[in-house]
Every structure is written in structure tokens, then in C-alpha cells.
Amino acid sequence: MSVALVQIQSCTVDMIRIKCPYCGERDHSEFTYGGDASIKYPALDAPVSEWTKAIFFRENIRGMQKETWHHTNGCRLWLEVERSTITHEIKSVKACHPQIEKITKNKS
Amino acid sequence: MTSLRKENYGKINREKVLGFNWDNKEYFGYEGDSLASALLANDVRIVGRSFKYHRPRGVMSCGVEESGALVTVGSGSSRDPNVRATTQELYSGLNASGQNAFPNVNFDFGGVNNYLSRFFAAGFYYKTFMGLPPFEWGKGTGIWMIFEKIIRKAAGMGKASREPDPDSYEHANDFCDVLVIGSGPAGIAAAQEIANNKLDVILIEQDSLLGGNSLSQKDFDPYLLNTQLKSSGIRVMPRTTAFGIYDNTIIGALERVTDHVPNPHNNLPRQRFWTIRAKHIIVASGALERHIAFNNNDLPGAMTVNASKHYLNRYGVLTGNNIVISTNNDSVYQTAKELHEAGSKVTILDSRENVNHDLSKDIDLHLNTLPFSINGRKKIDGIDICKTTDLSNKNTIICDQVLMSGGWSPIVNLVSHRGIKPTWNQENLCFIPGEIKENISVVGSAKGIWDEKNCIESGFVGANEAMNTFGIHKKEISFPSVGGWSNPIEPLFEVKSNKFPSKSFVDFQHDVTAEDVRLAHREGFISVEHLKRYTTLGMANDQGKMGNIIGLSLMAEQLDKTIPQVGTTVFRPPYTPVPIGALTGRNVGKHFRPLRVTPMHQWNIDHGAKMIEVGLYQRPWYYPKKNETLSDSYIRETTIVRKTVGICDVTSLGKIAIQGPDATELVNRIYTNPFAKLPIGKARYGIMLRDDGIVMDDGTSWRLGENEYFMTTSTAAAAKVMSWLEELLQTRWTDLKVNVTSVSEQWAGAAIAGPKSRDVLNECVFDPSEITNDNLPFMGVLQTKLKDGTPCRVVRISFSGELAYEMYIESDYAHGMMDLLWESAQKYDGCLYGLEALGALRVEKGHVTAAELDGRVTIDDAGLGKMASTKKSYIGSAMRKRGVLSADDREMLVGFFPINEKETFNAGTIVCEKNNIKGQGVGRITSVTHSPELGHWIGIGFVRGGLEKWKDITLIGADPVRNKQMEIKVVSPHMIDPEGKRMYA
Amino acid sequence: MLNRNSAIIEKYNIGKYPFEDKIEIILFENRNLIIQQIAAWPDEIPNVEKFFSDQLGVQKNIDFNRGKILNNNSLWRMEPSKWLLLGSTINLPENLGTSLELSHAFTSITIKGEKSDILLNRHLPLDLRLDNFPIHSSASSAIHHVSVKLFRLSEKEFRLLIPRGFALSIWEILLETASQFGYEVIDS
């Protein structure tokens, strides 16, 4: 939690609601943005070229994008969110961990 | 002109007389009055001076669009400028004054600007930068710098208080099924229909009374309505403005809790900043009446037509005796009748040719007629009128008030916040909301529906749409059509004047005239966005509520385009101003940021600590004795630690419990150094890298059991490391059976450092034989008990380079642990030490912290390359040697000494070569301290190429901020006991 | 054993603080509360639930963000595979998951009274309407950017777990807000 973030968030109306598969719909202030969820990180011993691609190469998507969010001030799940970069519309949210995803999918 | 309080009119409480103060004079009004209505009733006509020209201005409306009666309420620290008198409820003892005037609004020296107006036309500020003709004298900021002070004083609005805001504010959250904005006929119909279907409804109304435009009806009873709504289970929120609609049908709203109360109780917040999350929103925000641009249309006594009806029927104030109404539409005729019935002489100027209305013979109706110019200086004496066909042939009517109606503008602002462009309705000459794809319905006159019956009908349709959101399906009905006047409206935006400069105002608040709009066009500002910024049209605190459409029509005329082709500017939140205090809520003063303390916070203070904020934490900085300064104190503390023993609160370090059969595997993958074979009961210092090979954090991990580790992180990176481990376990290594849990708050920690630290510990623990060099060697971990049996953890670890330990105990016992340690340490002439001494000790040893590990540094740069395993793969191992990260001239960790040992330097000093003192130099000093042991100042930092390259070369430490340069030399960062004999002792 | 020291003791002033003669909030600290986290391996959740049934007598499996009040303790599901046991500890077999004592990590405060939900909503962006947050619901959220855990014990009674280091500051803010309703701090 960076101090700058705290100050900015204090002064804005919370704008997005994210439907956490465990907690239900919550304000986005409870979540922290992670990064590109479509990246498959290589094995630790993979060559530099593979790691370079995974770390530095990103699409600049106009439209639906898969991204990770952390429910930091909630159930602490890392989530895969499909969000439109144009409208903020959130199409789907699921737990990143496959076993947790199964458990939460059955319930929600 | 004297206005009258009319018997039998108004919804005010005549039993309750309220005294108030206006411009240092006492007046009286009634409960239920607005400040504006009370001023009008007292025949106070001039209530402000205009922004640029200091023209006298009066009350022009009865609501949030008010552009004339902007006043200052309160004084001292409670002074609140630019308050709309029309929305300020009167209370006993209210103290208000006119603004932008000296000595007062009735007689204002600034009025001379009115005669200099040709110099203050559109783009005045910009032109000032271009200099004075003929030689552009003072071009750039030259003239501006001279004139700025004068101009700023002359032009402007009310002055904000310079004192801290004494009021408190708060945030509030709510949820509902359907939120209805506006309590006019349409909003009420919608809210009641939805509540009848058992849904949870919140109704928001910015006014203190419910009813919206119904409040201008003689027989309407807002109190009865309130009772009805509440009995149907609707949550009614009066005095609350929905100032913005955001994603996911969330609204932001401002509730004025005590702005209408004489002496509000301290426990109440002045205002509440609401975030309300609804499933469906019904916007019934109504419409605003426009004025007409013609010469002198701003004189006190000029007002919108509907406003006068409100003053009559809500406040019982008849605003004029001899009233001229100028219109282009049907909405004024009912008002004309009522004003006439109330005793005024009424004349109507209608710009249209054919109008069918059943009108009393006593009301003069002039068809085909335009208002040309209002006569008078500080009040209205009469009006020049002319036929639409012949602007040069004028008649004068004697009157004391001119009411204007140039048509109505639906309040599309809130819908615009969602990025929905309004569409132009040529038939009704107004913008109406565009197509909405979210769960938002617009009803009533906000949709451009004028007729009251149709407004109510539209409320039911909106209610149906809302209920569809919840799967409740009702009989299909569709919205009544837009409009509803029997005689169509005809365009009347401006009546062109033959005077120059004319005083035909488009935007009253910013003194933008019709001529300014044309000037902007002539000077090339033909986009509506440019027009807005060049003329400042619509940029005052009413945000163009009254003037925008007129401005657009003038621009369209210049461009020979239609209004929809010209477009409209985008409305953004807030709809009406929101005070900064309300935005911050309770997060002010010491609660500006969350305040975090360690479990021995009070103990530290009780023992003389001066505290310092580190991130969110309050930590002991130094423990001064008597008259010691910071510098005296930390030098003493550092000396004592090296000589005997010191105790320091280190609770702020991050702590993470790592549990499970794959705990070892996890730890081994995230640290650069090997952890796979760490025995139980031992700790290891470790470095974590990021994926890209840069150092993320350093810390220690202790192996408590086969499957259990206790990890410490730096204070700054505690939260980041915790999230990072969770990310790895949940997204990448989902097969690992390991749980991570933050235990930062569960454990309190103290460092015991110095040659006598073992003796101190021995006195505190249950079994002293445990704390021997053999039983607890360097990096050994012990789970043991204090003397009295309280469990604790001890690790032999050193940040100071001395023989040292850290002791951890469950937080609630922290005070007790400190008592024990301190009692024992005092016997050895020990001390308590704070962050400053901690820093000094570690700089002497060349230990890095967040000041060095700043996200640019590799493990090799930090001189810790030998901690990077070559036998295993770990996070960052692939990337840490990539191209730029293994270049020869990277900045490497070194120590710095001043050549002249009496000199001092600061962190942030730039290290340069002797004859090349510029730019980023060859390095930087990141941390400095006085070293008592060495007897002079020392620093650590980075220099390109490292110690090898600069050994024995004199460099310059440049500190341009302090205008300082000094000679320095590069040394090993390990400045004291480089072999580490002391900590192994 | 050493004495335990409350994190909010310096600002814990027992007494009545009415507003316009009314007291609509009652607050007290649940001092020395035992808190244990039980974390199941995801594939062992059914066995952990069986374990709860055998050891604690929890008949019906606890749903997401719900809790079960037992004899001297209560069990709350806080995350898909994590529960908090309040009031006692239990020994979880290693093959099912891990357990961890967190009694000192949180300050526990009970807030009850007519305006308790309204007070909480001044700070918490949670939908506390009874239909959406029934009795024996729990939630993790944040007050002033500090993670907190909330439990509903009855319609107008809540328990709040605040990270110990932030507890004093959050306690002060809560009292500030509660002053407009009138409040009473009672012995813990």
C-alpha cells in the first residue's frame, strides 16, 4: 500500500465494482491491480530469451484484456479479470489457482 | 421597486421569525426562507458584483444555477465563499456578505472596470502575455508579472478563509436496489411505484423540501409528501446532491448536515460525502430555464420567469410590482397569471407570431416582440422593446422587473458523466439525454417532457424499467413524447445590440458577453472546446447551467452551422461544487494516513523516545537525555551499543509464517542463496530478486521446524513481499503445498546489540545456559521462555556488526519484555537506541537498506554477488546477468570518507570527478552518518566501476541543492570490523 | 507469564458519551481473545470439514463468509480454504493443512446498538443490509485502507478484528464517528 495511493483513493468516489468469486461484489479499492494475466511465466531455468519475452513484451489491447487483481483487503485471492480497457466493463472474474477456482465456481 | 411578502402565499413558517445579518446590517426572515428569498423580501436587490466588470448583480434564479447571488457566508475560519444565496437556507444568526466589491456591493470602486470593459474582453489574460502594442512591450511574462497582482485583486469571486477548516466531515456508504435522483412529480411517481413492489428505494433531493418544481405551486404541500414517502418505506435523503454518476450505477452524493443549523453540535459532521451503490438509477433531475442575451440583461431585477413563481408560492415574496416577461415559449403564461393575481402589473413580450392563450385582459401581451435593452443603473427603470421584424424602432415600457424565459434545458449533466452524449431536439430547442445502455432511466423534464401529467407517466415508465432489472415485469408502457407545449417554442437566444461594447451577457458569472463569443470566433477559436477555454464560458461554478446553450447557438450562427453540428462540451462531475473537506472526510490531521504503531509504542514514549514516521509506522527516532540534540543523542547511543549494549524496537520488520511440506522449496526458489539445507534452529540472511533480476528485498528466514519457516522482510517491503508470495503460490506454483500468512502484527521484536548483549539476555530468559556461544551460535534460532515462563523466540543476528540478538514475543507481552530487557541492560550501562543510531551502526558496517535497494540495484551492484547461487535456479536468476545488468561501469556499493575529516555531507550528494562536476556525475551517496568510532562523517552509496576504479582518487561530493562541494574519497563499504570478529564473538 | 497489554488501552475510557441524551452505540474490546487460523490444502477441504464436524460438532459445512457459533467458541470461513476459530485452539492433522495462532495479531472490538450498522457503513464499503449480510456472516474489507474482518453476531451486533498496530488509530476514528449517535464504552 503506497502512501500516494492512499491519498489519491481517499479523495475519489469508488468507481468500479469487482465481483470476487469468494466475497461477492466489492469496491475496487479493496483490490490491487497485478498485471497481464495472459502471460505464462517460463520455468526458473528457462533461457533469458524466454524470460525477456515474458517480462518485457506486452500487448496494448483496446478492448477485453485479461489481467490479474489481488483482493488485498478481502479474501487475499489472486483473480483473473477480463476487463474492457475502453469501458471498464468486467466480463468475468475467476480465481487464478485452479483448485480454488473449482471450489469458488461451484458455489457462486 | 419594493417587493412584498404576500399573505396567504408561501410554505414558510411565519410563526418563526429569524434574524440574520447581511453586509453588517440586521434583517429578518422566516423559517423556510432561503437567504435569497429573505433578501428579496427585505428589498435588498444588489447582492453581488460581477467577476470582471464589477457590475451590480441581484438574485437571478431560485436554485443551483444561480449566477448573481453568490455570497460569502460566515467569517473567520468558517468563512465560506461563493455560496449560492438561492440554496442557502436561512437560519437564525446567519451572517452573510456580498463579495468582489469594495467597500460594499452597493458602492464599489471596482465598478470602474465596467467602463474599461473593452480591455477586458475574451482572451484578456492570453493577450496580456503577448505584450503591449505597438512593440509588444513586456511580451511573455513581463507585463503579466506586473499586472497580475492588481488583476487578481480586481477580478474574482469570494475569498476562501486562510485558516484551517474548523468543521468535520465524513464519508458514508450505502446500498439500495433503486436510487431516484430528484423529488419532482416524475421522481416521486417512480419512487412510489418501485417501493410498492417491495424494492429498497433511496430518494435523493438536493433541496431541504421535497417536490422539485411542485414547490412553485400554490397548493402543494411538501410536508405531506414527505410523510407519504416515508410510510411507503422509501429512504428519503433531503439536502443531498447527487453530484456524479460513476461506473456500475454508483453515485457520489453530498449531504449538507449542518449548513442550515445556527450553532451545530460539534459531534455532527458539517457535510457527508456519500458513495451509494444502486442496481438501477432513475434520474429525475428536472430542467433549468434559460435566460435571453440582450443588452443589460444582468441588472438587479432580471430573473428567470419560473424563479419568480417559486418566490411567490414557496416563499410568499412577490418579486416585482410592474413586471415585464420576455419569452419564446408557453411555460411563462401560468406564472404571468399568478403574478397578476398576486397583485403585480404584468406585460408579456412573446417573440412568436401566433400564440393561443386564455389570458386575463389585464395582462398586456405583445406578440412578435423582443426585449432590446434594460434601462437603469443599479435597478431596473424600464425596458426598450422592439418588433422582431424591426430592431431599430423601439418602445420603452416602465417596469421594475424583467423576467426572461429563453426555453428550458433538461439537466443532462448526470447522464453525461457516463459518457453519453446528449442529442439536440430541434422541436423543443434543447439537448435531451442520448441512448443509455446501463441500468439508468431518465424521466420527467430531465428527458425533455414538459407537461406535469406526462412527467408522472414517465416516472411510471422509468419505474418499470428499474423493476425489469430485478425481473419484475409489468404491463408494457412507453414514454410520453418529448415536449408538450401547445404552441411550439421558437428560437430566441440573443437580441443583437447596436451598442459597443454591449452588455449582453451569455455567462453572468464570468461576465462573458455575446460579443466575446463572436470575438473568439474572429480570433480563430472555432471549436466549442476552444471557445469555452478562450472566453471561459461555462467555466464558473455554475458550469454553464444557464449560459451554455446560448453560447452554442451564437457559435453555430457564426459558423453557419446548427447547434448539434457545433456540439456541446462534456459535463463532468461534480454537478455542484463539493468542498475539499468533504472529499477528505475524517482523513485529516493525524488520521490523514492510517497510523501504525508497534506494541511497545507507549513504552518507547514513556522511556523518552522521540518518534519519527517511517512509512505508516511510528518508530523511535532517538532517546534524548536532558538537553541532548538529535545528533548528541544518536552519537551517544551508537557509542554505547559498540561499548556495552543497546536495545531497539524492531517490530516494524515484516514477518511471514511459511508452513507446509513445500515450505523449503518455496523459500529456496525465492532467495538467491541456497536454503534447501538450512537446518532446523538456524536462520539465514537472504536476498530476493524480482523477475527482471533487480533486487526486491532482503531479510532473514528462520527454520522453526521441518515444514515451518519464519521470514522477516524489510519494513518498507513487508506488504509487497507478502502479496508477491501469494501471487507466486496462486498463479505460478499452484502445485506447492505451502501456506503463507502475515504475522507482522502477532510478534513484537527488539534488537539487543553490543558486547554485553549475551549477559542481558541471560538475565531475562528462563534457562541462561541456552544462550551460550555453542548453543546459540551466529544465526542460531531458539524457541524458549522468559524468566516468568512467557514463550519467546531468540535469534542471534546482527545489523550493527556487534554481538547481537533479536528477541520476538507475542505482541500483547511486548511491554513486559521491554521492562525485563531494559532492567537488565541498565545494569551494564546500556541504552535504548532509535532509528538514527540504528542507521549509524549499519552504515558503519556497510549494510544496505531501502535507501540503497531502490529498485535499480542488482545483487552484484550491492556487493552481495557471492550470495547469488550458481547451483540453483531462483526468481531472477535468468535475468540478473542480462546485458545492461552486467556491464563493467555499473554503479557499485562503496563507502565514502571526507578528505577533510571535519567536513560533513548529506545523503543525495552527487559524486563527480574533480574537473567534471556536472550532470549525474559518476555516483551518489545514499546514506550518511557521523561515525563515533572513526571520529568523522562517513557515507555509503554507489560509484560507477566500484572501489577498484576509484581507490586513492580524490572525488568531489557535489550538493547543488545546498550549494556545497567537498573533496571525498572512496573506501570499502565495510568500514568497521570488516572481518566480523565482533558478531561471531 | 507476563501481563497482556491491550493495544487500545491508552484510549479506552469506560463511560457514557451521549448525544442529545441518546446512546445508540455500545463498544467494548474482547480482550485476550484466542484466534487460530486453520488453512486446509484445497484438495483436503472435505476432510477438514469432516474434522470440524468430528472435533467441534459443526454439523453443516460452513458456507463462504459465514460462521457457526459453538459452545465457547465460533468458527468462521474467511477464505475458500481458510477458517478462523475464535475462542479456542484445535490441533489440525498435518496432512489436512496448517494451523497458526494469531491471537495477538488482531484487536477485537464488539460494536452493538441501534446505529451499529450505520456507524460501520460510515467507514466500510460493505452492503450490511440484513438480506445481504445475514446474522453470522463475515467479511474481510478495509477501514481507512486498513484490512479488517467483520462478523455479524445479531442484527445490531458486530465484531471487528483490526490489525493490532492500526487498532488505536481505527478505534479513535470509530469513536469520533460514533459521537454523533451517542456511545458508551463498557468494560471489556
Image (cartoon, coloured by chain):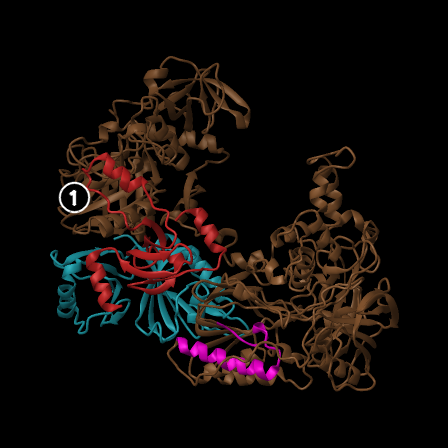
- Residue B637 appears left or right of B407: left
**Residue type at the position of mark 1:** Glu
Q: Colour of chain B?
A: brown
Residue at horizontal 34 percent and vertical 38 percent from the top: B647
- Of C155 and C164, nearer the camera is C155
Tell me the residue that label 1 is attached to: B665
Is B462 covered by the magenta stretch?
A: yes
Residue at horizontal 62 percent and vertical 81 percent from the top: B451
Measured from the top left, where is residue B313 in percent x and y? 71, 81
The magenta-colored residue range is B441-469
Quadrant in which the N terminus of chain B appears: bottom right
Q: Would you identify the image quadrant in which residue B56 lies? A: bottom right
Supply the letter of whichever chain is red.
A
Q: Would you identify the image quadrant in which residue A53 lies? A: top left
- Residue B612 appears left or right of B495: left
Q: Colour of chain C?
A: cyan
- Residue B96 appears left or right of B185: right
Q: Secondary structure at mark 1?
A: helix
Is C51 covered by the magenta stretch?
A: no
Q: Does B715 sit above or below residue B393?
A: above
Tag 1 subunit: B
**Label 1 neighbour load within 10 Å: few <14, some 14-19, many 20+:** some
Q: Would you identify the image quadrant in which residue B290 lies? A: bottom right
Q: Is residue B787 visible?
A: no
- Of B928 and B481, nearer the camera is B481
Measured from the top left, where is residue C121 in percent x and y? 43, 67
Q: Does B536 sit above or below residue B294?
A: above
Quadrant in which the C terminus of chain B appears: top left
Measured from the top left, where is residue B263 in percent x and y? 64, 67
Residue at horizontal 24 percent and vertical 65 percent from the top: A105
Q: Does B351 sit above or below residue A101?
A: below
- Residue B482 appears left or right of B624: right
